[in-house]
Image (tube, helix red, strand yellow):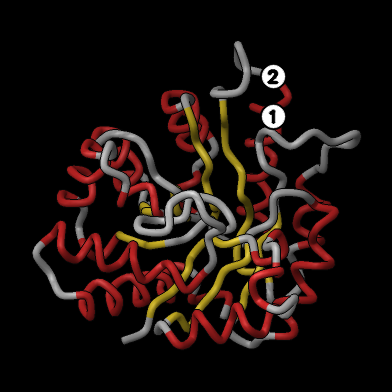
Amino acid sequence: MILSDSHCHLHMLDLATFDENLDNVIKAANDNGVKHFLCVGTRLEDLPKILGIAKRYTNVAASVGLHPNEPTEHEPNAERLVSLAANPKVIAIGETGLDYFRTEEKQPWQLSRFRTHIQAAHLAKKPLIIHTRAARSDTLSILKEENAREVGGVFHCFTEDWETAKAALDLGFYVSFSGIITFKNATDLQEVAKKMPLDRILIETDCPYLAPNPHRGKMNHPALVKHVAEFIAVLRGETLELIADKTTENYLKLFSSNF
């Protein structure tokens, strides 16, 4: 059984509970069957640290992106993102997208930033990692307008309804579930997971955030992605081994041109 954490922030972990050693985080994950990790960027300033981690561990890959809510003095253009993504350990562009949850209205710079990332993905020929929150319509519209189908990618930490999931699938994207799916109040999301075609599902921790039950409220880390896989397996009436194998197969297929 091989599991993949398709979205984690290893560079953000508080290592106090792991004897201040990232080796222990990776070992705990390996001991739970997790063999692949995608360390996702949310600030360009963090890229050297992310690449340092990816260089240190052969099974850790990286992404380049500026989160839609992340402030910056200088918006990157597509050429800069492509330059940063040239490192062979970088397998995706993002996370990027739209998030209106923390803003009272849509921000023009956020829309522009999203388009820039999609343009960079086209130029770099790397898939996108999409973050969308309270911005379903604009997210889907921009993806269509910018021909994002040509590069593909994943809607990470999915929390939307089946209509949105279906729209993502129609665009050729994958859908990734985090620990949120294990929460008692996530019944609508659980229904989405039941309907999803197995060949388009990914799993993730989004660590250090959103630890799954029974660890909710604690720091999340890659070993706990197994709980996400276990929950989805029970939810769908399938085996853990099947969910693990298929989600890893999907992970490798999505990013295959960059491995």
Would residue 192 appear left or right of 68 to someone viewing this image?
left
Q: Find out whether the residues at labels 1 and 2 contact each other: C-beta distance under 8 Å.
A: yes
Image coordinates of residue 60 in percent, x first then y, are 61, 78
Q: Amino acid at mark 2?
A: Pro
Question: Is any atom of residue 183 visible in this view?
Answer: yes
- Residue ID at (77%, 49%): 43
Residue topped by disc 2: 108
Label drawn at residue 74: none
Camera-nearest residue between 134 and 171? 134
Q: Nearer the viewer, residue 186 or 141?
A: 186
| Disc 1 crowd, CA 10 A, few/some/many (<14, 14-19, 20+) | few
Q: Is residue 176 visible?
A: no
Which residue, as the protein is rendered here, is positioned at the far right?
A: 73
Furthest residue to the top? 104
Q: Which residue in the structure is indicated by mark 1?
A: 112
Q: Secondary structure at mark 1?
A: helix
Q: Residue at image x 56%, y 86%? A: 27
Residue at image coords 72%, 64%: 11
Q: Amino acid at mark 1?
A: Ser
Q: Is residue 66 depicted above or below 200 in this figure?
A: above
Position in image of residue 128 (x %, y %): 55, 53
Q: Nearer the viewer, residue 20 or 244?
A: 20
Q: Residue 191 at what x, y percent from top left? A: 17, 43
